[in-house]
């Protein structure tokens, strides 16, 4: 980005610029509403920074191409929406199993199937977590502003590199299409994680070595250097050789979950609004968090002690933060444009018998502050 | 020609292979390793990308970088690898089910797009690994585990398909002639752009058993009966060529590959 870093931009533009700022130098994708501006920005900007843009024949191959590019050493990403995200699920699992960093942007729209292509929704929360088959961990981040689109995309790349994992940026059509002020700042030192290289002799290197405590993630040298590498979507041993012995399978599958779950404290980020003295809590994320913030302000003006916990990290789920808040409030409501996907998680953590309410819309219309206030009026008094 | 031989690229400690007695995969594997040796490829700068299926295990026996991806998507992974680092030599190993059936869309787009990859599709006319079901190249009338009464569909002619889609190098060999196969694969690796080599093979275990060619010997004979050299086919009548697969080189052009053209477009854009 040239010129002044303070911009008036859309979420989609901010995602593309955030990716470039994070060092992304490869984009493969397939056009789909409401994410196409990310592809268009990547097509325009990648050549300017010496990167590559390619439009593939579908989302299956787009996901495959970014995985291949990452294995060859480039920070790589793709962007899509519901139908395309569904098509990416198998190869998302390939990135999990091969432990290949990459970033997948899903600008959520209303589903299922073609649904309402131009209408926002937040119905892919569980798909982001469990969409690919088999046990695994997953990181998903949810931006609620254009600034978030920029900042969380940078964070998505750094988490992907640090933990050798795909990261899903779970945006939504409202935030992606929204235009507002943002600062396309230069990333601070230490914010950008570059791929680490092994220090051992090539013949000793074990690209899939597991630290039982999950404190250290084995580096992934790119194809083409001194380390000859085997990457496979099949069950494999620490050298990447196909191996389906029970002991190895057990260790590897637990590792794919634990490497993220055991580092929850490093990965999870939340935002708290007016929670210090709150008697009632809202939980929300993405576009719905914006309406929730406005609802908190209005409720406070009316003398109700309502606060908001915004989940900027959806996966791994902020278990500790949500449980802790539930333990100290009289009532809670989860505000989301689906029929209760995060609400279900909140209920899982509700060991305290606190009434938990869902504020939902799935009609393609945004949840308004008035919706939240009227839905919670009775419960929060 | 280099001083290397196929053993320099073979992961000999993995032998014996998982493949059935009489399978043609070993012949294609040796042709590939010989082609690597002929060109003196640096194993650190070479990537074998494979899909899923019997032939998808081939990368396990090749001592270069390997990427063993999902079923049907090998060309898409390979595209990302090659575009991210054009210095790599990327060979893509697929079967007829993997590369030409579930992955058919990627195959025609790879041919059109002309990324510098060499695809070797081993065509044994059925899905071997999953138990002998029909694929996009199963000949009409053949019996497979999912066409027990005879297959009702016509197969793809993969060389005609990829040539029509624009692949600059297209050739077909058979496991009856490993030396010719080695030459075709070497050619493919030497050409800049997308090279497609179909290796006709046999599956005595599944296809042969159900089609009265139970032994490898009978299968190899039938493969001979099914094929004709491209050079001699011109003098034959249409009747004599009917149902035969031609062996030879169907395209050998040298258009600029994807990376060259992308860079040209970028340079042109910068000037304007």
Image: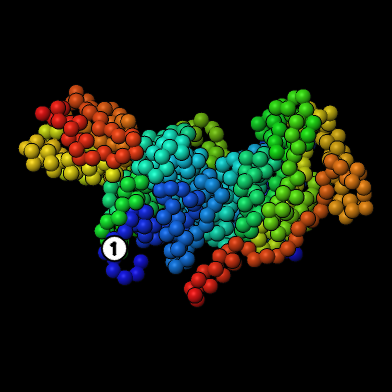
Foreground: A332 or A293? Answer: A293
Image coords of residue B155 (percent x, y): 75, 39
Pinpoint residue A225: horizontal percent, then vertical percent. 53, 60
Residue at image coords 34%, 69%: A2
Q: Which residue is mark 1?
A: A7
Q: Element type at marker 1?
A: strand
The answer to whether residue A358 is above or below residue A238 is above
Chain bearing mark 1: A
- A368 left or right of B83? left
> For residue A342, which quarter of the picture?
top left
What residue is drawn where x is 29% and y is 65%?
A5
| In the displayed structure image, the side of residue B152 where residue A326 appears, left or right | left
Q: Is residue A307 above or below residue B247?
A: above
Q: Residue at x 47, y 66 (%)?
A: A47
x, y percentage for residue B231? 88, 55
Question: Left or right of A359: which side holds A278?
Answer: left
> Which one is nearer the viewer's eye here, A322 or A29?
A29
């Amino acid at each position: 980005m040239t010129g002044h870093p303070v911009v008036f931009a859309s979420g989609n533009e901010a995602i593309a610029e955030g990716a470039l700022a994070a060092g992304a130098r490869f984009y493969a994708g397939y056009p789909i509403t409401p994410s196409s501006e990310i592809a268009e920005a990547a097509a325009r900007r990648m050549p300017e920074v010496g990167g590559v843009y390619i439009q593939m024949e579908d989302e299956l191959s787009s996901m495959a191409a970014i995985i291949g590019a990452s294995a060859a050493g480039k920070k790589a990403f793709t962007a899509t929406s519901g139908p395309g995200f569904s098509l990416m699920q198998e190869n998302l699992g390939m990135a999990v199993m091969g432990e290949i960093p990459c970033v997948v942007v899903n600008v959520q729209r209303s589903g299922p199937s073609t649904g309402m292509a131009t209408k926002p929704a937040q119905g892919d929360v569980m798909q982001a977590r469990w969409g690919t088959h088999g046990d695994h961990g997953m990181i998903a981040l949810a931006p609620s502003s254009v600034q978030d689109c920029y900042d969380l995309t940078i964070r998505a790349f750094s988490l992907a590199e640090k933990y050798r994992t795909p990261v899903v940026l779970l945006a939504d059509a409202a935030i992606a299409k929204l235009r507002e002020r943002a600062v396309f700042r230069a990333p601070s030192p230490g914010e950008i994680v570059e791929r680490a290289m092994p220090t051992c002799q090539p013949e000793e290197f074990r690209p899939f070595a597991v630290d039982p405590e999950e404190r250290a993630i084995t580096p992934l040298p790119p194809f083409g250097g001194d380390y000859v590498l085997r990457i496979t979507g099949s069950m494999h041993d620490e050298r990447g050789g196909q191996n389906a012995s029970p002991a190895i399978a057990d260790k590897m599958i637990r590792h794919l979950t634990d490497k993220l779950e055991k580092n929850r404290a490093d990965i999870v980020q939340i935002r708290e609004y007016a929670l210090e003295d709150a008697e009632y809590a809202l939980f929300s994320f993405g576009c719905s968090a914006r309406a929730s913030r406005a609802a908190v302000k209005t409720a406070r003006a009316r003398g109700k002690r309502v606060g908001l916990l915004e989940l900027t990290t959806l996966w791994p789920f902020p278990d500790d933060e949500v449980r802790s808040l539930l333990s100290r409030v009289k009532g809670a409501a989860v505000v989301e444009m689906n029929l209760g996907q995060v609400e279900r998680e909140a209920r899982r953590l509700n060991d305290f018998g606190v009434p938990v309410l869902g504020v939902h819309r799935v009609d393609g219309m945004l949840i308004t502050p008035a919706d939240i206030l009227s839905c919670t009026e009775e419960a929060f008094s | 020609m280099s001083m290397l031989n196929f053993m320099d690229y073979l992961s000999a400690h993995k032998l014996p292979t998982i493949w059935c007695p009489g399978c043609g995969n070993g012949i294609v594997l040796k042709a590939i390793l010989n082609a690597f040796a002929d060109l003196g490829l640096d194993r650190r700068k070479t990537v074998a990308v494979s899909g899923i299926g019997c032939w998808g295990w081939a990368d396990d026996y090749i001592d270069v970088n390997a990427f063993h991806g999902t079923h049907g998507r090998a060309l898409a992974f390979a595209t990302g690898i090659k575009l991210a680092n054009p210095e790599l030599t990327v060979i893509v190993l697929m079967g007829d089910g993997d590369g030409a059936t579930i992955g058919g869309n990627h195959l025609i787009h790879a041919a059109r797009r002309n990324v510098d990859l060499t695809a070797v599709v081993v065509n044994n006319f059925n899905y071997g690994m999953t138990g002998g079901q029909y694929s996009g190249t199963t000949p009409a009338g053949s019996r497979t585990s999912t066409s027990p009464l005879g297959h009702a569909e016509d197969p793809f002619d993969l060389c005609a398909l990829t040539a029509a889609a624009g692949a600059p190098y297209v050739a077909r060999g058979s496991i009856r002639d490993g030396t010719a196969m080695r030459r075709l694969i070497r050619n493919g690796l030497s050409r800049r752009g997308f090279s497609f080599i179909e290796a006709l093979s046999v599956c005595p275990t599944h296809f042969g058993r159900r089609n009265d060619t139970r032994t490898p010997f009978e299968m190899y004979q039938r493969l001979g009966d099914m094929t004709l050299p491209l050079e001699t086919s011109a003098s034959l009548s249409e009747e004599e060529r009917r149902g035969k697969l031609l062996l030879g080189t169907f395209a050998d052009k040298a258009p600029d590959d994807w990376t060259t053209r992308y860079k040209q477009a970028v340079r042109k854009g910068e000037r304007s």
